[in-house]
Image (spheres, grey):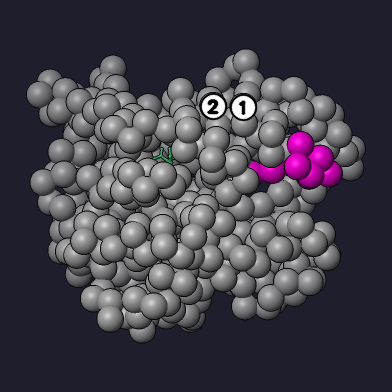
Amino acid sequence: MKEFSIVIAGGGSTFTPGIVMMMLDNLDRFPIRQLKLYDNDGERQGILGEALEILLKEQAPHINFSYTTDPEEAFTDVDFCMAHIRVGKYAMREQDEKIPLKHGVVGQETCGPGGIAYGMRSITGMMEIIDYMEKYSPDCWMLNYSNPAAIVAEACRRMRPNAKVLNICDMPVGTLRRMSQIINKKPEDLEVRYFGLNHFGWWTSVKDKEGHEYLSEIRDYVAENGYLTQVEVDTQHMDKSWQETHKKAKDLLAIDPRFLPNTYLKYYLYPDYEVQHSDCSYTRANEVMEGREKTVFTAAKKIIEKGTAENSGFTIDSHASFIVDLARAIAFNTHERMLMIVENNGAIANFDDDAMVEVPCIVGSDGPEPLTQGKIPAFEKGLMHQQVTVEKLVVEAYITGSYQTLWQALTLSKIIPSAEVAKNVLDDLIEANKDFWPELK
Ligand code: NAD
Ligand code: LMR
């Protein structure tokens, strides 16, 4: 079997060790000859790089491993770039969450004003790494799961339409694992139908390979418990705040019991509840900094100190194996069925052709081929149209540098109550993001 060369962009990410461990666990399905980490923060990446170097020497010495901040070194001779960058890191995520809350508005990583602020930062970083990839390894594919994926995907469509970038999200994967737990099945034995935008969609069918439909069984469970399950099904999305989110799916289902909702819809459909249950001085960013970030970096430092990764605190991020499935689909033309973020072009029959939607696709060597999901009902279509227009306006504002357009984007967001609040939030976000956003006039 061919052996692949991979670069992880955002090498200093809290997800890097788990994803590297997951790839080592999948070497029989996806052999690797070379693995590089790339980040623009050498110090942060250096800690994980040094620890992973020790680990790889022990567990997979045949893999040529390196870490660098030099784009040419990183992106030369690579088949796949796995991208998980966070422009502005956790310090800026904290601002994205706390600034809107100060104005009584939901503060969330990818939804509403927080997501818009993050999107305006991510576009620059994403375009930069796409250009490095195209310059140094023109045949390389980027598997991107950097957030906010909806805005990033729209920016790719507008600004790099021919780039080999595949945008994918782990949230539907995580929720499907919960569903499989509810009906006592393996997630890989289930096939779904789904329509929506990223972090904004609905499952319309969950069947096994024999064609048995489980939607109503899962629905009965979710109506009582949300997606909260008894057993640990996910290595991610387990913290206290996430348990609340899984539970809240029950109230999302109540609004339209025909379909199973994506958990992120809670920020759009229950924003007042969300604000009431938020703490302006302690948000999800704080939870992650004190949790995952601390755990991962402490484990790395311990490995470096001991000079061995034996009994290290790094754990396999098995839920991220969808990334290997995606790479295999491209490399070996497996025609894997996966939810991807793609240009609609009729996949949702009564929705705009140029909207970036999330739908099941068959993925092979040429990339994803969307499966048609038919017509969608008025309620979901109306919500999606409002949200996709927000995402389009954000990218338009980034390209044109227009304050007016970005103000319109925030005003249109379902999460923000008025144009006045939108302006106040926007002005604070501009101030906080002056090192990252393009100048707006
Ligand atoms: P993190 O802050 O720990 O890591 C991000 C890294 O990206 C940092 O080391 C930072 O220095 C680097 N970076 C920032 N800008 C860069 C640039 N222009 N070029 C190169 N590197 C750059 O963040 P994290 O929590 O580990 O999340 C990383 C990303 O993965 C986020 O976008 C997050 O939303 C996304 N994410 C992915 C999944 C998934 O599907 N596995 C799940 C959740 C989140
Ligand atoms: C993360 O863990 O940072 C992401 O999965 C998103 C979130 O809010 O937890």
Question: Ligand 2 sits in which quadrant?
Answer: top left
In the rendered view, does 407 fall on the left or right side of 168? left
> What span is in magenta?
254-262
* Tag 1 residue: 247
Label 2: element kind: helix
* Tag 2 residue: 244
From the image, which quarter does the C terminus lie in? bottom left
Would residue 177 be visible to someone looking at this image? Answer: no
In the rendered view, does 433 fall on the left or right side of 341? left
Residue 206 sits in which quadrant? top right
Q: Vertical placement of 433 versus 138: above or below?
A: above
Would residue 159 be visible to someone looking at this image? Answer: yes
Q: Vertical placement of 312 versus 186: above or below?
A: above
Label 1: element kind: helix
> Residue 45: where, in percent of width, then height?
18, 46
> Residue 438: where, in percent of width, then height?
26, 74
